[in-house]
Amino acid sequence: MNILKATFVAALATSFGVPAAASPAFDAFKKICGDTHADFPAVKAALGGAGWAPTEILPTNMEGVTPTEGIARTSTVGNQRIAIYAWVGPKPPYQLTSCTAHVPSLKQGQATAEVKAWLGFAPETSSSAKATWRYGLTNGAPTAVTSAGFEPAAAGDGLYFLNVLTEGGEVVIDLLKIRHPKAN
């Protein structure tokens, strides 16, 4: 009877869109990129921990940005391989930080559901190819922002763009932080 009840509860949760438990790789992304609010020194320190090995740094393809520092590490968490690439650099008048995870064994739909559950709101745009969130922080908690809120967010704790997409057979979870360098 307990197996039947557990199956019913799981089916009911799935039908209402309740995500399954987060994958170990997503938890690693959240801890290293998300919980640090993409603060490069904190990301770098987290990637210096046990279990993270150096890997090749991927170049940024963001026009007008030349990173001043970057780090790339790979690890296996649970049974999932994850590579995290992070960099910091100026794009005047802003300071940008990127923290990107590549996870071959994660599916895009699962990653999108995990990000939605973590942030607490739906993506601003979503398709089968890509989901995008734009947010700032209100009392430390992510809050969706529209284009009218971009400058105030960048002048405060930062404006965040988070994308989930599939690239080369891997799910990519990319967090970009945009901040005015003079912001406290």
Image (spheres, grey):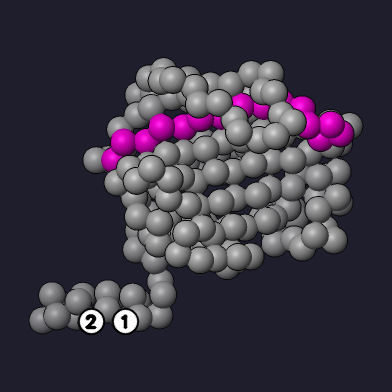
Q: Which mark is residue 166?
A: none
Where residue 54 appears, as percent x and y from the top left, is: 41, 18
Q: Residue furthest left?
A: 1
Badge number at residue 12: 1
Residue identifier under label 2: 8
Query: Is residue 27 among what the camera can see?
Result: no
Q: Residues in magenta?
A: 80-94
Instruction: Residue 122 in the image: state x and y as whole percent.
Output: 57, 67
From the viewer's perspective, tell me whether residue 140 is left or right of residue 86. right
Q: Residue at x 40, y 80 (%)?
A: 16
For this rendering, which residue is in front, 39 or 95? 95
Quadrant position of residue 123: bottom right
Of residues 173 and 43, the one drawn nearer to the viewer in this rendering: 173
Q: Is residue 90 above or below residue 165?
A: above
Residue at 81% of width from left, 35% of height from top?
94
In front of the other: 140 or 79: 79
Residue 148 magenta-highlighted: no
